[in-house]
Image: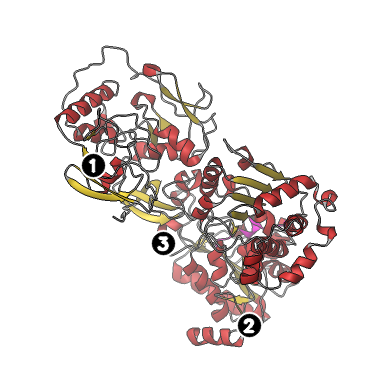
Amino acid sequence: MIEYFDPNKDYGTPARQSDKQVTLDIDGVSITVAEGTSIMRAAALADINIPRLCATDSLDAFGSCRLCAAEIAGRRGMPSSCTTPVAEGMQVITQNGKLAKLRRNLMELYISDHPLDCLTCASNGDCELQDMAGAVGLREVRYGYAGENHLQAAKDESNPYFTFDPAKCIVCSRCVRACEEVQGTFALTIQGRGFDSKVSAGSGGQDFLASDCVSCGACVQACPTATLMEKSVIEHGQPEHSIVTTCAYCGVGCSFEAQMQGDKLVRMVPYKGGQANHGHSCIKGRFAFGYATHKDRVTRPMIRNSIQEPWQVVGWDEAVQFAADKLRTIQDRHGRESIGGITSSRCTNEETYLVQKLIRAAFRNNNTDTCARVCHSPTGYGLKTTLGESAGTQTFDSVMQADTIVVIGANPTDAHPVFGSQLRRRLRQGAKLIVADPRHIDLLDTPHLGEAYHLPLRPGTNVALINAMAHVVISEGLEDPDFIGRRTEGYAQWREFILDPVNSPENLAETLGVDPETVRAAARAYATAANGAIYYGLGVTEHSQGSTMVMGIANLALATGNIGREGVGVNPLRGQNNVQGSCDMGSFPHELPGYQHVSDAAARGRFEAMWNVPIDDEPGLRIPNMFDAAIAGTFKGLYVQGEDIAQSDPNTQHVEAALTSLECLIVQDIFLNETAKFAHVFLPGSSFLEKNGTFTNAE
């Protein structure tokens, strides 16, 4: 039986991978599943639903609520179906009078210490405790509230995004387990024993805000009651419908359900079927969506003749005509190369493609650029040169097969939190960690971390470090000669260079500021691992040596055979949500979509045929060149799509001087940002929640 995964269904316990199949009988139904599968999951796959409260398929089985008890022929007692694995020929009964009585008694005990305010509860209609009371047939509770209970426990409202109401807690531990197993923060614990057991944030007595909680929302997602509840749902009520979308923050590309009431967004819930996040999220994707409906959003076009004048609200037709007339006048006066545009790594592939097409086909030049070139063009060039493709080699899930993980110039737990959580999960399972970074990043403090090496190199010495590690690998015979012989070229020349004594860790110790023995130990750990994976970020690419370093990383991976299977590879961690896509779509001044150089006549011919216009064969201006040319008086018009260059680009005074020199600046965004202060035309943009399209994530 091949499992069909329905992202809208909870199977109770995680799937188990096994080549061996087991056939059993559950309530008279013959079921074949992978060995190691729990009885609960096997039953769910056959649409036999066993009552449960502590079990969910995003967490390991726990077996505390006892609602899922079952009878097994030939065995004594009633074991929990969530913790009991299937066996060949097993006969299971999940429904009979004895089990029904047990479940009703258990539910009575839960309800006897739970407020019965369902009609006014924010979780009404979306509460697993409520569902289970109905499922077991509980119609009345014999135990009143006369005895000791927890109904007056004080709420914790300290977190800005969700509330914690311990009066509604059933101590199922799902929130604690989610914080440990999924997020890896270990911010929650169960304090006390027996009747005094309770969920506690931090070291006991702390509120959520003062604890180590990072507001990822995993505990809220796991909670079966209204104990942990989004404040947006408490304010607006339960959503009515949802739409699956992709987060527009970082390069992980998490899938979310945008849950809505009419056209009002109530909450963002991580989509269980998301291939990049598997139902997990971070604070930004989960809770930072209020900007989409913020009162400062600009929703109507505006124009002005001078940046000293106030804005004039106009219709779309007038704004577009005003902008077109301005740009046409500039080109008539100053030439075809006097205008250009900047695309955004936060916009969709489709939008980015159209902007670069507008510049090349309508502006008739190649003056198009993007922030992605600044932050990750070394990745495109370096990987294209060494591996033949300008993107990473692995999916995020591949890290779960890695035995040694190398992180260079990146801080995944801050910049790519969902992947950072997955990486930490693998480290807790025993993978070795190598961090090359001047900073002591959070990964080095991962709970239960085993073997780890921190290489706190001096800024600017990336290439020296990767050469030193390669020197150790080659000089100690740790390379993979079979892989090198079958899958690489140019090895002999590279080997001769790397073996030069100048590249030894000892000779580079003063340059690097790293103990040579630590470099050697790290290199051995990577080269001798069954699977070694390298992940790098802006600490590699935003350097003058960025491309050289990327090629050095790729060469090290090739020399050790760590390319071409799960758990290995060279993996750039892209900063914004569509860095990869904006590059793919042709945002560079020297390359058409698909990384085809503008000097390539055949490539130009294909686009000229599609667009029915001639395409300039000379590379256009990059962003810094545009600024310089504007100040020099030869560049006079600029269209900026979803990018705040006055805020984010270096040398603010230089940027502002350039923007002030323009005769026409067109800004398209959702807010009046810093760049818009210098604009003559403002065109409202759409957030990711308001449009169709695609992003290409860092995978």
- Distance (Cα) linking label 2 and label 1: 72 Å
Label 2: few (<14), some (14–19) or many (≥20) C-alpha neighbours in 10 Å: few
Lower position in the chain sequence, tag 3 or tag 1: 1
Residue type, label 1: Asn
Left or right: 25 with respect to 687? left
Q: Is mark 1 on a helix, strand or loop?
A: loop
Q: Quarter of the image holding residue 623?
A: bottom right
Region of the chain picked out in magenta, as a range: 641-651
Q: Residue beneath label 1, please?
A: 49
Amino acid at circle 2: Asp
Q: Measured along the vertical axis of the image, is residue 140 above or below residue 283?
A: above
Tell me the SS state at disc 2: helix
From the top left corner, tell me how far across and down residue 309 is, in percent.
60, 60
Q: Is residue 234 visible?
A: yes
Residue bearing mark 3: 691
Quadrant assignment, res 567: bottom right
Q: What residue type is labelled 3?
A: Lys
Instruction: Tell me, yes or no, whether the two marked residues, 3 and 1, touch with CB atoms within 8 Å.
Output: no
Q: Does the magenta stretch include residue 588?
A: no
Considering only order in the chain, which callout, 1 or 2, is on the residue closer to the N terminus?
A: 1
- Decide if residue 404 is on the left or right side of residue 466: left
Location of mark 2 (residue): 332
Using residue 254 as the reference point, say whether residue 666 is left or right of it: right
Position of 227 compared to 497: left or right? left
Q: Is residue 649 magenta?
A: yes
Residue closer to the observer: 332 or 579: 579
Q: Can residue 138 be seen in this view?
A: no
Residue at 55% in and 73% down: 356
Mark number for residue 460? none
Could you classify mark 3 by the number of other residues whose Cα lies within 10 Å: few (under 14), some (14-19), or many (20 or more)? few
Q: Quadrant of the N terminus?
A: bottom left
